[in-house]
Image (cartoon, helix red, strand yellow):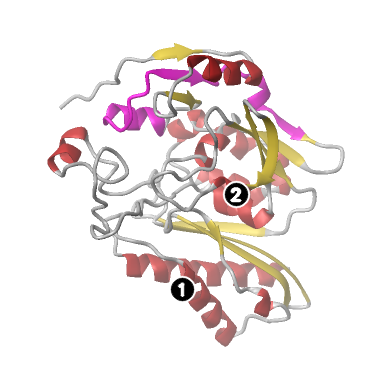
């Protein structure tokens, strides 16, 4: 069955302020009007009947969203409209934030990366094997709690959506401690990235109606970081589990350790209870303890065809491996 895009009105602002004004002028619900940049996630969902907004506001003509800026204090700012392809090849990102460039290179395929954007990956819709399906398949299952249905097929006795967040950039940005800039009808606010996510698979972003993520602020002195993802195929697939680790050390001992995970929970998150590794040489016992801490906080549900237990163990193993690699080169 050929699935066509529903009819919609396309607006093309030339600036951030114009985009915000267009959203306000439509006076529509959040479901009826959407911002769109690369469209590699939104347009696919629309073709599958997952959402039918009446109006799309294209951000492709907003030049202010596409800049990579080196600031006088040594920090860098990424416009939310910077494409993943640009991020991968940009000299500042490759030299000073190589984990960011690596994570961008791991996203989807080359064609997707030419269109997909930084902001789009951070705001990526949550995913579930019962949600990201064709319209006829979802109809035959009475839809799901996330869209048009009344039941979460992952956990039918509950009233919570367990769809998982699967963006690759978020965990790297989290361990680097980035802040994001959001512009909306009420003005501009700058917040830590973690505050963008609600933890609810159904309504997973804290963006208010009309608000737009416009920029990512990278730190002036980033810690060494690495990112690794697990997926069924070696390319294109979303992460079943993705782990970013940032570590500073001296004389073979850990000074600071930060770990973030994506692909398993309803939101990307920072692993807690890692302070005890300060001063550790990450011997075998500490490596085992580190993996166990990660496994306990990773809580995948059966939102994919891969068993949750395996994804949990893989996340722990990746965190352990990346931390050891970073300490060896500290």
Residue extending farthest left: 140
Q: Against 123, is 247 above or below?
A: below
**Residue displayed at 62% across by 50% down:** 173
Residue extending farthest bottom: 285
The reply, left or right, for residue 233 in relation to residue 290 is: left
- The image quarter in which residue 125 lies: top left
- Tag 1 or tag 2, which sits nearer the N-term? 2
Residue 84 seen: no
Residue 230: x %, y % from top left: 42, 58
**Residue displayed at 56% across by 35% down:** 119
Residue 121 seen: yes
Instruction: Please tell me the numbered disc located at residue 296.
Output: 1
Please state the total of marks drawn on the protein image. 2
Q: Which residue is mark 2?
A: 195
Residue 140: x %, y % from top left: 12, 40
- Residues 199 and 313: in front is 199
The reply, left or right, for residue 157 in relation to residue 258 is: left
Which quarter of the figure is the N terminus placed in? top left
Residue 42: x %, y % from top left: 40, 31
**Residue displayed at 23% across by 57% down:** 156
Q: Residues under labels 2 and 1: Cα distance? A: 22 Å
**Residue 52 is a magenta residue:** yes
| Contact flag, marks 2 and 1 (Cβ < 8 Å) | no
Residues in magenta? 41-69
Residue 225: x %, y % from top left: 65, 58
- Secondary structure at numbered mark 2: helix
The reply, left or right, for residue 227 in relation to residue 70 is: left
Instruction: Please tell me the numbered disc located at residue 203.
Output: none
- Secondary structure at numbered mark 1: helix
Which quarter of the figure is the C terminus placed in? bottom right
Residue extending farthest right: 72
């Amino acid at each position: 069955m050929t699935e066509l895009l529903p009819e919609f009105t396309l607006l093309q602002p030339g600036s951030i302020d114009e985009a915000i004004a267009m959203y306000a002028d439509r006076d529509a619900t959040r479901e009826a009007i959407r911002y769109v940049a690369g469209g590699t996630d939104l347009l696919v969902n629309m073709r599958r009947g997952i959402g039918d907004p009446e109006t799309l506001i294209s951000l492709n003509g907003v030049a202010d969203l596409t800049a990579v800026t080196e600031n006088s204090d040594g920090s860098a700012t990424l416009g939310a409209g910077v494409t993943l392809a640009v991020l991968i090849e940009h000299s500042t990102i490759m030299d000073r934030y190589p984990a960011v460039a690596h994570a961008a290179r791991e996203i989807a395929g080359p064609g997707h990366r030419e269109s997909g954007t930084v902001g789009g990956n951070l705001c990526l819709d949550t995913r579930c094997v019962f949600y990201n399906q064709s319209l006829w398949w979802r109809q035959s299952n009475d839809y799901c709690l996330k869209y048009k249905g009344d039941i979460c097929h992952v956990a039918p006795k509950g009233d919570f959506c367990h769809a998982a967040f699967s963006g690759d950039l978020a965990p790297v940005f989290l361990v680097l401690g980035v802040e994001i800039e959001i512009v909306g009808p009420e003005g501009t606010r700058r917040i830590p990235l973690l505050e963008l996510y609600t933890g609810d698979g159904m309504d997973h972003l804290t963006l208010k109606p009309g608000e737009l993520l416009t920029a990512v602020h990278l730190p002036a002195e980033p810690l060494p970081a690495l990112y690794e993802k697990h997926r069924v195929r070696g390319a294109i697939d979303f992460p079943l589990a993705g782990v970013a680790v940032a570590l500073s050390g001296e004389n073979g001992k850990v000074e600071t350790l930060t770990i973030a995970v994506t692909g398993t929970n309803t939101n990307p998150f920072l692993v807690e209870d890692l302070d005890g590794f300060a001063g550790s040489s990450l011997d075998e016992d500490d490596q085992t303890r580190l993996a166990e801490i990660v496994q306990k906080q990773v809580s995948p549900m059966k939102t994919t065809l891969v068993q949750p237990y395996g994804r949990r163990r893989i996340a722990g193993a990746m965190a352990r491996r990346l931390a050891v690699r970073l300490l060896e080169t500290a």
